[in-house]
Amino acid sequence: MVTFTGSNAVGEAVMKAAAPTNKKVVLELGGKSPTVVLPGADLDRAVGPSLLRFCRNAGQGCGATTRIVVHRDQLDELVERSRRFLEESVPVGDPTDERTEVGPLISAEHRARVEGYLERAVADGGRIVAGGGRVAELPGWYLRPTLVTGVDPDHEICQDELFAPVAVVLPYDDLDEAVAIANNLRYGLNALVWGPHEQAVEVAMRLESGTVAINGGGGSRPDVPWVGAKQSGVGMEMGTDGFAEFFTVKHLQWAAG
């Protein structure tokens, strides 16, 4: 058996390497997870935690919710609240400082790659409505948390995993469209839904995602499985189901009497 957590490209290589001897693989791979904000959701409650989920580890986390799907009537309000929150409540700086929320990216090459996505999104009609840009006064590969609007859900910045503190905001007009936008990608690792509980549960059940947090969910749960749908992985990690991946069932049978 081989278990691996990382990129889809390396996951593909692991599967190929394991294939000649039919080794079992458990792969936890990429994500481009949605936050679905339902009509009637409490933005006071939803905005901060939603933004922090893609800022954590400078966005360098597979479960980061980097696609914010919001009803068109709440789009402007969400964007303005997000702009203020990122400017006032998300300090960027030295990761050893306890006050810091966002540290640097892993390398200069990675930051340049992410900046390329942002440049192409703007060239294609997108707008950076919050954050963005380097932090010149800090040594290291810093990128301010960035929010982008005005891009089509099929655009590369909405489809590819950036591994950076960058999110896109995508408006919808009805719940069917919201679900379609949320599911419109090759990944299915994680999701977040905000709104009236019963409606949020109904939407969560329609999302093609291994994990869905409703109205914030709860803390990290090592007792439950972390599993990816579609190209987000093969098999499970954590919980009883995760342990079970490491075992093979043996069937014993004998004649009665």
Image (tube, grey):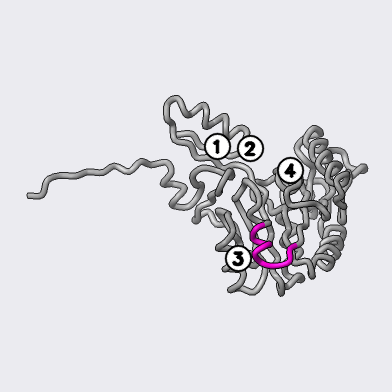
Classify residue 255 as left or right of residue 187: left
Q: Residues within 10 Å of mark 2 (few under 14, many from 20)?
A: some
Say which label, 2 or 4, has the lower sequence index: 2
Q: Is residue 177 magenta?
A: yes
> Mark 1 or mark 3, which is nearer to you?
3
Helix, strand or loop at label 3? It is helix
According to the picture, the residue beneath numbered tag 4 turns out to be 162
Residue appearing at x 79%, y 36% in the figure: 113
According to the picture, the residue beneath numbered tag 2 turns out to be 7
**Numbered disc total:** 4
Cα separation, mark 4 vs mark 1, equals 19 Å
Say which label, 4 or 3, has the lower sequence index: 4
Residue appearing at x 71%, y 43% in the figure: 160
Q: Are marks 2 and 4 in contact (CB under 8 Å)?
A: no
According to the picture, the residue beneath numbered tag 1 turns out to be 4
Q: Residues within 10 Å of mark 3 (few under 14, many from 20)?
A: many
Percent across and percent down for residue 45 are 73, 70
According to the picture, the residue beneath numbered tag 3 turns out to be 203
Determine the main secondary structure of the stretch shown in magenta. Answer: helix
Cα separation, mark 1 vs mark 3, equals 31 Å
Residue appearing at x 51%, y 37% in the figure: 3
Please give the range of residues in magenta. Answer: 172-180
Amino acid at pointer 3? Val
Amino acid at pointer 1? Phe
Helix, strand or loop at label 1? It is strand
